Image (spheres, grey):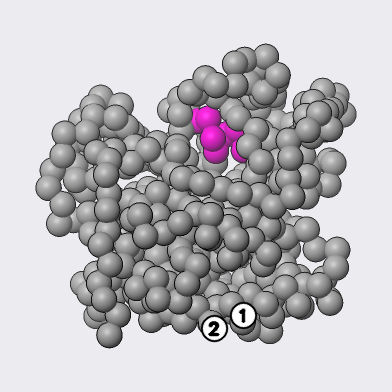
């Protein structure tokens, strides 16, 4: 019997702009050569002439933030090791576009800026998960009860429809949300359909279902970053946090991934990361880095957010806007569009991808009313924003 673990949230506000507690990028050092590469693309007239006119001001801002402003300022664009790691994996002619869309992802939410499309889109191949992590809404039995309608797999036709609608409009995509994407029946075909379509495609998985076929599907697709979700460096703590999980099995699967990548995909530039949720002081980042560091390119901890059941939380007095309303959009397995995954039961849903274009949804009355309420310090008018601590 695994003993229950204590979840400690020590803050009144969860700042989504600063969700990383720690991140380590293997064998990476910021150098003059890195900055020279960035400066080169920001001044390449041939690349700049191909950029949408609406994004030209971003290039000016990038130059100011990276090379002119005090890098200690709270707001603005910062070149971090993980951003540079992603930048350097790209072909030269894609690097300027990457920086522009990364700026939209990082800075628009800080300054509450918006344009036609979300900087980031999360597509949910499935809401099912085989784990019951203690910090996750999968522990909510009302959510996981099939008859309540929250559980399902996205159809391949739906996935293709979404991709076709967003290509060349949204460049940063995650295949993940309320469930583990590798459970989806059509995930291999979905991955194949993403090839060469996005600048930054990420997939998150607990790796328990990773097998040879899925590994080949990932490595031959458009995936740029593969995130293995794990929060501990020993079996006992892992089992307490990731209920139903088996660390030995996960390690074996990641070893198989690395073997296939080394033998069959030597030129692959995919970035691998182990990312855990820091829930209390029993987790040690140095132990995580030492344990996982030889298996992946990056090791990270994100701060714990008490989102496992926002609906049961008391109304709070937070006034700051939620930055997610300017950062990303979620599309569930059934095509429903939601502004947030803390609201995992979709009380805030703004529409459906079958009936509306992405831009119409992003700029819809429902979305803009949410943004207005948050900017006017009236989060309490929107449920469950009234009980949420994310800003």
| Residue 96 percent location from the top left of the image | 75, 35
| Disc 1 packing (10 Å; few <14; some 14–19; many ≥20) | some
| Residue 5 percent location from the top left of the image | 28, 67
Q: Are marks 2 and 1 in contact (CB under 8 Å)?
A: yes
Q: Disc 1 on helix, strand or loop?
A: helix
Q: Is residue 160 visible?
A: yes
Is residue 304 part of the magenta span, yes or no?
A: no
- Residue 336 in which image quadrant: bottom left
Q: What stretch is highlighted in magenta?
A: 102-108
Q: Residue 249 carries which label?
A: 2
* Left or right of 47, for residue 24: left
Q: In which quadrant will I find the C terminus?
A: top left
Q: Disc 2 on helix, strand or loop?
A: helix
* Left or right of 307, for residue 59: right
Judging by the rendered image, the residue that carries numbered circle 1 is 253
| Residue drawn at (27%, 49%) of the image | 9
């Amino acid at each position: 019997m695994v003993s229950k673990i204590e979840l400690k949230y020590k803050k009144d506000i969860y700042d989504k702009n600063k969700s990383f507690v720690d991140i380590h990028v293997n064998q990476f050092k910021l150098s003059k050569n890195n900055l020279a590469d960035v400066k080169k693309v920001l001044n390449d007239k041939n690349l700049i002439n191909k950029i949408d006119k609406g994004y030209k001001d971003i290039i000016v801002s990038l130059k100011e933030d990276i090379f002119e402003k005090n890098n200690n300022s709270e707001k603005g664009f910062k070149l971090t090791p993980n951003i540079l790691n992603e930048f350097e994996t790209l072909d030269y002619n894609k690097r300027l576009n990457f920086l522009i869309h990364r700026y939209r992802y990082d800075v628009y939410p800080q300054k509450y800026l918006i344009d036609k499309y979300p900087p980031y889109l999360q597509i949910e191949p499935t809401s099912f998960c085989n784990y019951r992590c203690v910090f996750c809404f999968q522990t909510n039995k009302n959510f996981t009860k099939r008859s309540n309608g929250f559980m399902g797999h996205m159809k391949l036709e739906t996935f293709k429809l979404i991709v076709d609608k967003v290509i060349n409009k949204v460049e940063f995509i995650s295949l993940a949300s309320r469930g583990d994407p590798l459970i989806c029946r059509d995930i291999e075909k979905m991955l194949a359909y993403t090839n060469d379509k996005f600048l930054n495609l990420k997939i998150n998985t607990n790796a328990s279902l990773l097998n040879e076929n899925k590994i080949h599907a990932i490595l031959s697709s458009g995936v740029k970053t593969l995130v293995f979700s794990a929060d501990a460096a020993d079996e006992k703590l892992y089992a307490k946090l990731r209920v139903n999980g088996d660390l030995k099995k996960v390690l074996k699967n990641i070893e198989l991934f690395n073997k296939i990548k080394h033998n069959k995909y030597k030129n692959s530039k995919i970035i691998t990361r182990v990312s855990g949720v820091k829930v209390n002081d029993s987790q040690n980042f140095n132990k995580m880095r030492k344990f996982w560091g030889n298996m992946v390119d990056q090791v990270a901890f994100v701060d714990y957010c008490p989102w496992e059941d926002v609906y049961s939380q008391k109304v709070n007095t937070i006034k700051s806007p939620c930055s997610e309303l300017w950062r990303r959009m979620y599309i569930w397995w059934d095509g429903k569009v939601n502004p947030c995954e803390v609201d995992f039961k979709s009380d805030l849903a703004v529409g459906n991808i079958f009936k509306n274009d992405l831009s119409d949804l992003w700029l819809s009355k429902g979305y803009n009313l949410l943004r207005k309420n948050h900017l006017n310090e009236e989060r309490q008018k929107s449920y469950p924003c009234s009980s949420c601590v994310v800003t």
